[in-house]
Amino acid sequence: MKKINFLIIIPLILYPINIFCNKLPVTVVNICIIKNVNHLNVTSNDRFFIIDLTTGLKYEQLPTNHEIELYKNYIKVSETKFLTNMIQIIPKTENNFIYVNKKPYRDIIYIRKINNKLSVINEVGIENYIYGILKMETNPEWPLEVLKAQAVVSRTYAVKRIGRHQEEGFDFCSEVHCQVYRGVNGEDKRTNYAVDLTKGEVLTYKNQLADTVYHACCGGRTENPENVWSTYQQSPEYLKGVICKYCKSSKHYRWEKIINEELLIQKLNNSGYKIDKLLSIKIYSKSKTGRAKEIAIKYIYNNNRHTLVLLANRFRLIVDPWQIKSTNFVSIIKQDKKYIFSGKGWGHGVGMCQEGAKVMADKGYDYRQILEYYYPGTEIQKWEY
């Protein structure tokens, strides 16, 4: 390693959001891409630097593979020991990528010691972050107008939620909980173009950032958020459910899934509910849109009968949202030791229906009209960096 005695201070700061201005509150976000490992490897397609953030020493590296391992009192990179809890890795030139476990990422990488394990955080500009999201959250082969709509939605969703994992030392995770992020591997020329065409654009309601939740397919009508999440007391005007006449052609419009009783018991027990035998699963209450709001589960535990009432969306997440695609149930039927769930749509049903938005774009609607349809009363604003 070639050592350069150079003091550099680059703190990892999570800034609060001010939604009452026309300027984006941050220019970079921090995404945790790897958690709780003891070793990993990094390289680049050109020379790059590793910086000890305790001493400020900067080491220039050749573009070869470097193994990084965690020891009790230090982080080891190849043969060099760093007596620090965090190192920074940056490309020497702006257009190079840093590869972590052979996967490329833009901008800056931090490797941090957290709870005696290594975590990897990618610090990227907001637009680069949206680059790495869009292909993962939509189909890059869809019409450009729906890709532009998704770019505005994903950008707004991110900016409004900056610091979501602040207690863990980063802004976002890289999974569905935030938005799926895969760095450069999550990019596509068409989705990147949609990001570029909408640079800095966010969706607002009364000059405040809108809560731009979205889902795959609503099954004919979107849902009010308070019927899905207990954190909502009532719906913002722009998130009240709307009739969607565009997603009927989607393969997700109708679905059916057979699930063994034994698996359902296992899933519920793993979530803290003590169940020996299931007696029935029925819709307990419905929202005005027709979706199940609550599910009643009758069961036996310690030879006693009990009834458990759960929010339908919580039940769906407990079992498996890839199996029970929505709470827009048509029926729940018990057959021997199996339950047959049938329904419409895929996802929580709140906000933009992606399949419906795609059909709207097919019919000639532009991205502004798509967003107005699913978030009525909102407007697109271009906020400066």
Image: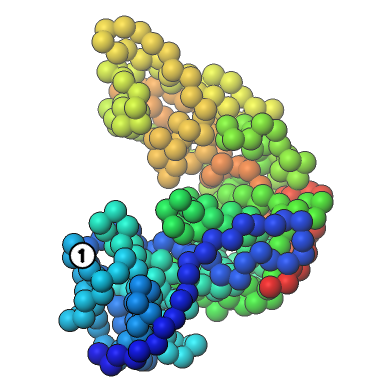
Left-right relation of 314 to 156:
left
Most foreground residue, 201 or 287:
201
Q: How is the image coloured?
A: rainbow
Label 1 sits on a secondary structure element that is: loop
Using the rendered view, name the quadrant where residue 359 is placed: bottom right
In this view, 244 is above or below 139: above
The residue located at (65%, 27%) in the rendering is 287
| Visible residue check, residue 81 | yes
* Residue 284 x/y as whole percent: 54, 19
| Visible residue check, residue 354 | no
* Residue 236 x/y as whole percent: 74, 40
Q: Which residue is mark 1?
A: 73
Using the rendered view, name the quadrant where residue 349 is placed: top right
Which amino acid, by three-letter code, is at mark 1?
A: Asn
The residue located at (40%, 40%) in the rendering is 320
Left-right relation of 79 to 293:
left
The residue located at (46%, 91%) in the rendering is 93
The residue located at (66%, 41%) in the rendering is 222
